[in-house]
Image (spheres, rainbow, N blue to C red):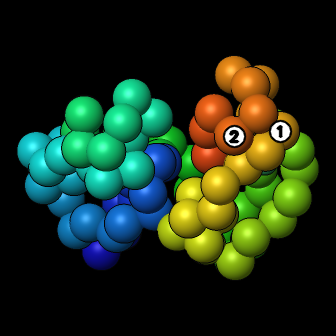
Amino acid sequence: MPNFYCEYCGRKFSTVASLAAQSCPNHPNGMSKGKHRLYQGTEKSQYTCEYCGRTFSSIMSMTAQNYSYHPNGMGKGKHSPAL
Ligand SMILES: [Zn+2]
Ligand SMILES: [Zn+2]
């Protein structure tokens, strides 16, 4: 069975439907202002941030950190996994 991950918070889901049905605590518009978003890439042992190129062992550890150099402005966003 494949796992599905939210691109914003890194939570793991067993179905896309359950992912899309729940609000995301890490949504870029604000806490629980939107649904989880499916990460379209494949499951990896390391994930690279598409903005800064740093690598993380999981999407969850990547998105848990506040990100100072986001293109939207200082502290305005999170790292985001490249596909
Ligand atoms: Zn999420
Ligand atoms: Zn980054």
Taking 57 as reference, is 32 left or right? left
Choose top left, top right, bottom left or bottom right for residue 11. bottom left
Kind of residue sitting beneath label 1 = Tyr
Which class describes the residues within 10 Å of circle 1: few (<14), some (14-19), or many (20+)?
some
Task: Estimate the x, y position of residue 56 in percent, counting from the top left.
Answer: 74, 70
Image quarter hosting the C terminus: top right
Choose top left, top right, bottom left or bottom right for residue 46. bottom right
Q: Earlier in the sequence, mark 2 or mark 1?
A: 1
The residue pinned by badge 1 equals: 69
Seen at 31% across and 53% down, the residue is 25
Q: Secondary structure at mark 2?
A: loop
Task: Estimate the x, y position of residue 24 in percent, counting from the top left.
Answer: 28, 49
Seen from the viewer's position, the closer of residues 2 and 59 is 59
Query: Within 8 Å of ligand 2, the CB of disc 2?
Result: no
Task: Estimate the x, y position of residue 60 in percent, counting from the top left.
Answer: 52, 68
Q: Are marks 2 and 1 in contact (CB under 8 Å)?
A: no
Seen at 39% across and 29% down, the residue is 29
Task: Estimate the x, y position of residue 78 in percent, counting from the top left.
Answer: 62, 46
Which class describes the residues within 10 Å of circle 2: few (<14), some (14-19), or many (20+)?
few
Q: Is residue 9 visible?
A: yes
**Which marked residue is nearer to the observer: mark 2 or mark 1?**
2
Choose top left, top right, bottom left or bottom right for residue 28. top left
Seen from the viewer's position, the closer of residues 72 and 79 is 72
Q: Is residue 83 visible?
A: no
Seen at 30% across and 74% down, the residue is 1
The residue pinned by badge 2 equals: 75
Residue projecting furthest to the top:
72
Q: Secondary structure at mark 1?
A: loop
Kind of residue sitting beneath label 2 = Gly
In the rendering, which numbered label is found on residue 24? none
Query: Within 8 Å of ligand 2, the CB of disc 1?
Result: yes
